Structures are given as C-alpha cells and as structure tokens.
Image (spheres, grey):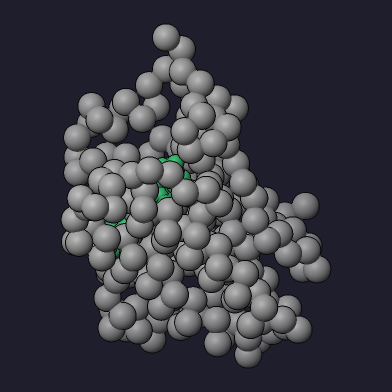
Amino acid sequence: MNRLKGKTAIVTGATAGIGYKTAELLAEQGVHLVITGRRSDRLQEIKKELESAFGVEVQTAAFDVRDADACHSFVDSLSVTIDILVNNAGLAKGTDPVFDADFDDWNTMIDTNVKGLLYLSRLIIPGMKERNSGHIINLGSTAGHESYAGGVVYTATKHAVKAITESTKKDLHGTDVRVSMVSPGLVETEFSEVRFDGDKEKAADVYKGMKPLVAQDIAEIIVFVANRPAHVNIMDTVIYPTAQSSATMVHRNA
Ligand code: NDP
Ligand code: 8X3
C-alpha cells in the first residue's frame, strides 16, 4: 500500500548516491520533494528529471548544511509543509589514526554529519510537532554501531547520529512524529572518492573483489521505513552487503 502519495519530503544530499536514489524512489511513489546539496547544477538536472518522469513538484535548495544561517534561510524560505525529513547529507574524510589526522577533516565530518543534521532537525521538527505529524529519517551507518581503526571521527559522528536519533524519539515521546535511522555498511557511491579526496583508484579498492550495496538497496529501505502505517516507528535498520560481516570482515575474491 502506498501511504506516501501526495506527501512532501526534504532529502538532504540529494545530488549523489543514497540521497539521489531516495529522491527518485520517493518521487516514484508520488512524493513531492525539496532536494538539497551544494551542487546547484546537479540539483537542477535532478529536478527536471524527476518532475518529467513522475509528475511531482521538486524544489531545490543549494546550501551547505554546515552553515547554520544558510539552514535557517532555507527553512524560512520553505513554501510547503514538510512531512518527511531525510537527513542524508554526510561524508567521511580520510582514514588517518587519531595521532596523525587532520583537524580540518575532523571539523568537516563533525560539522556536516552531526551539526548539519542537528540544525535541520531543530528547524524542521517544531512544525511537525505543532501538526502532530511527520517523520525524521537519519542516515546512520554500521560505523554508528562499531568503531574501526582509521575511523576515529567518522565512527564518532555516526555513533552521535544514533544517540541523536534515540534522544529525538524520546524528546518527541507522546506525539505522533516518527523518528528513524537507517544504518548501511559498504555502499558504492561517491562516498569513498570523497573520503580519499578524489583518488578513484583508492576508492575502487574499498569495493574490490566483493559485491557492495548500491544506493538503490538503501533507498528502497528508506522508502519502506517511511511507508509504514502511522503507528509503526522503525528505530533502526542495519544493512550489510552479504560479503561483509563487520567493518573489517569483508570477504573478497582473490
Ligand atoms: P555521496 O558522497 O554519494 O553523497 C553525499 C551527499 O551529501 C551528496 O549529495 C553531497 O552533496 C551531500 N553533502 C555532503 N556534504 C554536504 C554539505 N556540507 N552540505 C550539503 N550537502 C552535503 O555519499 P553517500 O550517498 O554514500 O552518503 C550519504 C549518507 O549515507 C552519508 O550520511 C553517509 O555517511 C551515509 N552512509 C554511507 C555509506 C556508504 O558506504 N556509502 C554507508 C553508511 C552510511 P554535494 O556534494 O552536492 O554538497
Ligand atoms: C560508511 C560505511 O564502513 O566506510 O558509513 O564506515 S564505512
């Protein structure tokens, strides 16, 4: 049953990867969209593509979620009521150990994955609470359930997303606003290229000899989570590729 048709969702980080596929699959269900990211040309292309393929309304907003003023202006400028917020924008930077890592990389991850997600939650939830209706879906990670060497701050940010999701649910206790998290393992998107500053070879090595998840796998789960009946709140879903059993256990063909 499609319970999503006619609703409106914000998808942050919709210019690539999981966010882009989520926007597409939501549009396929008849959900109107507000898509965000920093690349305005990509947002315009995706708007045209989804509007013509699915006949939904797609608004775009190019801004950096690390910028609190930009988040305020974005939310102030919204002309539609938001039913679903998919807090997807996020990234990893580097795999250096704690004693050797770059402060800028740490700040980028914390400011994007934690503070950006918090800013948008803080600004969107009051309307949902007032209407006693809405759904926040945060992108966590298996890195929010398990720490690994070389991921000191990335894993910390995703552990933070888990804590934020659980606290947000409790802050909204007694309302009909739902709060969920989706926690994937290895998904082949632009993620590793961003992590390794555009080094395509290093990025490809992450998925070498194994079949990783693809954005569609996760987008389907986000749509499933969003499409549950109003009395069902999925708190978290942990999704590994079959070839992965933990951060370090990845079965690869020789
Ligand atoms: P991609 O790199 O493919 O996409 C990331 C998206 O986030 C892009 O649309 C990018 O848009 C946006 N983004 C990044 N930084 C900012 C910013 N400062 N302001 C606004 N938008 C931003 O990665 P994925 O699709 O893989 O990642 C999406 C989410 O899923 C992230 O939160 C990630 O941590 C999480 N995740 C990913 C996994 C994976 O293995 N790929 C596994 C588990 C979780 P733009 O560049 O246009 O700003
Ligand atoms: C992304 C998955 O294993 O690179 O969240 O941390 S991992």
Which quadrant is the C terminus positioned in?
Answer: top left
User: In the orientation shown, which residue stands out farthest toward the top?
Assistant: 254
* Viewer-nearest residue: 52 or 170: 170
Q: Can I make out residue 18 in this image?
A: no
Which residue occupies 42% across, 17% down? 209
**Viewed as shown, does residue 56 lie left or right of 35?**
right
**Viewed as shown, does residue 234 lie left or right of 145?**
right
Q: Is residue 62 above or below residue 236?
A: below
Q: Is residue 237 above or below residue 185?
A: below
Q: Can I make out residue 246 in this image?
A: yes
User: In the orientation shown, which residue stands out farthest toward the front?
Assistant: 99
Q: Is residue 134 above or below residue 244?
A: below
**Viewed as shown, does residue 217 lie left or right of 196?**
right
Across and down, in percent, residue 38 comes to: 26, 61
Across and down, in percent, residue 238 comes to: 62, 46
Count of numbered marks: 0
Which residue occupies 31% across, 68% down? 111
* Viewer-nearest residue: 9 or 27: 9
* Viewer-nearest residue: 107 or 70: 107
User: In the orientation shown, which residue stands out farthest toward the bottom?
Assistant: 130
Across and down, in percent, residue 122 comes to: 48, 82
Q: Indicate which quadrant contains ligand 2.
A: top left
Asked which quadrant contains residue 157, the reply is bottom left
Which residue occupies 33% across, 51% down? 92
Which residue occupies 54% across, 75% down? 82
Across and down, in percent, residue 26 comes to: 56, 54
